[in-house]
Image (cartoon, rainbow, N blue to C red):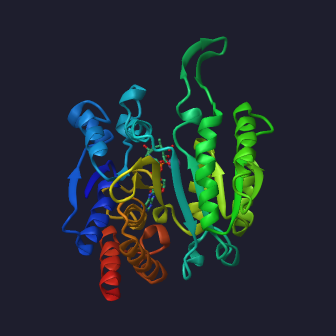
Amino acid sequence: MKLAIFPGDGIGPEVIAEAVRVLDALFFPQLTLWEGDVGGIAYKRHGHPLPTETIEMACAADAVLFGAVGNPECDDLPREHRPEQAILGLRSELGLFANLRPAAGYPGLEDMSSLKPEIARGIDLLVVRELNGDVYFGDKGERASDGGREGWDAMSYNEAEVRRIAHTGFRAAQKRRGRLTSVDKANVLESSRIWRETVVEVAKDYPDVTLDHMYVDNAAMQIVRSPGQFDVILTGNLFGDILSDQASACVGSIGLMASASMGERQTEYGTFGLYEPIHGSAPDIAGQGKANPIAAILSLAMLLRHSLGREGEAGRIERAVAKVVAGDVRGADLGGTASTSQIGDAVLNALAAES
Ligand code: NAD
Ligand code: IPM
Ligand code: MN
């Protein structure tokens, strides 16, 4: 079993260090860990945010654990050299088209949600976000216009791209509560019209799943009005990016939300995937020990489940995290004073108490 670890920039290395402590505590003698550079740190060391060696390392591994990329010092570099290209490049090079972002409330944490506790209590949804298409990967550029310089980004989806992510969404709904809400902007966008028609087609294979459609503006409103109505939200790359950050504030903090990015490649142990918190490098708190490592630790749990076939250990981590989150060891994002490593300690203690 080979695991590639890409800590990245800002709080990435801080939160990944805690996830690695959890991994060490679980003791997998058969696991080989590799560490690679991505993002601003890779640009500084190798002149590129996604060096060839990093891509090769990811390809040779059974799974990737990713921290975060982004550095304000790099914001004015040409696009191909900006840290964010590392994560976009990995997602496309590795064919990771399906991004799973679960958002579930924790008993005992309702007071930290941006919503009223009785509304927050109902959140248990999964955002299934398409990750290889949309405006992220369309043609883009800058040109002269009558109004001065004009930036443009083409937004598109073809049927094949929608079909494969729709299957992921329907299968996820079958394993959950059997409801799928497809979120688009089909009243305005041609790419969304193809999206909706294709999702309706795919739905015929899943008579046991109840499908509905929602425009993205309404979905943003409904997620804060009554998140309990959602089971699986199936959506495109851009809408999924935005709605998942929003859902994290309904749970309590972006520092709690993990994600799995998967494609079709099977390994000896499961499906190859890249696992990362949904948050970024948080330059405003980097280097201060204030980052919540729970999202990174839960990303490790998803990795163990989906890519390494270790459901038992994944469940142990999730139960330990639930105990910690409901307790009083909380970081600044959840109204407490605990540092990144103190939260890591609490998870390790809860894990030890379990076994
Ligand atoms: P961000 O997610 O980094 O931070 C948003 C806010 O949430 C900040 O106030 C931050 O302090 C807080 N926050 C984030 N993670 C936290 C954690 N674990 N614990 C406590 N608080 C946390 O988003 P941003 O500020 O818009 O972006 C910063 C940089 O990160 C940018 O360069 C952006 O491009 C990049 N980014 C990268 C990824 C990724 O690597 N996948 C994801 C999102 C943003
Ligand atoms: C995320 C991030 C990325 C995205 C950026 C850093 C490219 O916001 O993983 O959610 O937009 O997908
Ligand atoms: Mn995002």
Judge whether residue 242 can be spotted in this image. no
Q: How many marks?
A: 0
Q: Looking at the picture, how far across and down is residue 230, in whole percent? A: 69, 64
Q: Is residue 312 above or below residue 233?
A: below
Left or right of 182, for residue 1: left
**Residue at 52%, 43% in the rendered image:** 131
Q: Is residue 73 above or below residue 294?
A: above
Q: Looking at the picture, how far across and down is residue 314, in whole percent? A: 39, 71
Quarter where residue 55 is shown? top left
**Residue at 27%, 62% in the rendered image:** 17
Quarter where residue 190 is shown? top right
Depth check, front residue: 189 or 182: 182
Left or right of 318, for residue 236: right
**Residue at 63%, 30% in the rendered image:** 155
Depth check, front residue: 272 or 288: 272
Depth check, front residue: 246 or 98: 98
Q: Looking at the picture, how far across and down is residue 167, in whole percent? A: 61, 50
Looking at this rendering, what residue extends furthest in the right direction?
187
Judge whether residue 93 can be spotted in this image. yes
